[in-house]
């Protein structure tokens, strides 16, 4: 792929995944103290498509929110969101995108799963740590409120992202599911 096409594709991916992260934050189910959102699904999709460069749309998304654009959950924005109970999860998006992206750059499927698992662990570590610090909850209570309820949903979102990115990779390679692994030939 030539450099010009690669740059154009990177810019398009960055814009698309930044928008998807913002849209994923609006699709939220209120939960105390942290809402359920679709952001981790789009974070893993970005990692699967962009690799370690998924950090770029994630950082742009966080920058937009810090600049008071209403892109965080339920239309919130500003530095105050970073200082609130969900700030650690937002900050954890960066290492999560990096680790998941590095995992996706590796060929073996187990490396992809390990990258997503490491990304989730980084996300939870940042989120739970900040939740405990910002609210005065004990670390155990912050873990019970800020991680445990989200684990099944995040595993499902990671699985969906893996299936979608595998399908996209097959389409890029010219292989389609309707031919069961055989290359599709033009008519």
Image (tube, rainbow, N blue to C red):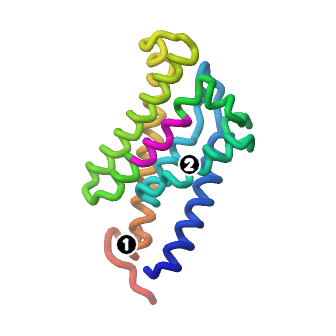
In the rendered structure, does residue 87 fall within the stretch colored magenta?
no
Q: Which mark is residue 136?
A: none
Residue denoted by label 1 = 179
Q: Magenta part of the protein: which range?
A: 90-98
Q: Between tags 1 and 2, which lies in front?
A: 2
C-alpha gap between disc 1 and disc 2: 39 Å
The residue nearer to you, when weighing 164 against 118, is: 118
- Secondary-structure class at tag 2: helix
Image location of residue 111, percent across then percent down = 27, 50
The residue nearer to you, when weighing 129 against 119, is: 129
* Left or right relative to 156: residue 182: left
Residue at 45%, 53% (x, y): give it: 47
In the picture shown, does residue 135 fall above or below 178? above
Query: Contact (CB < 8 A) between labels 1 and 2?
Result: no
Residue at 37%, 72% (x, y): give it: 179
Residue denoted by label 2 = 59
């Amino acid at each position: 792929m030539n450099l010009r096409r690669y740059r154009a594709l990177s810019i398009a991916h960055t814009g698309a995944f930044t928008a998807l992260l913002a849209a994923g934050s609006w699709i939220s189910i209120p939960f105390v103290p942290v809402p359920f959102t679709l952001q981790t699904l789009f974070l893993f999709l970005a990692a699967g498509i962009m690799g370690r460069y998924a950090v770029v749309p994630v950082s742009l998304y966080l920058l937009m929110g810090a600049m008071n654009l209403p892109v965080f959950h339920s239309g919130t924005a500003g530095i105050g969101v970073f200082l609130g109970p969900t700030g650690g999860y937002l900050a954890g998006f960066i290492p999560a995108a990096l680790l998941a992206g590095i995992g996706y750059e590796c060929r073996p499927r187990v490396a992809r799963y390990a990258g997503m698992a490491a990304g989730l662990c980084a996300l939870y570590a940042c989120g739970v740590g900040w939740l405990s610090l910002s609210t005065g909850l004990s670390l155990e209570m912050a873990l019970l409120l800020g991680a445990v309820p989200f684990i099944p949903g995040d595993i499902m979102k990671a699985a969906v992202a893996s299936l979608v990115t595998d399908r996209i990779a097959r389409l890029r390679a010219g292989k389609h599911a309707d031919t069961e692994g055989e290359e599709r030939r033009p008519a």
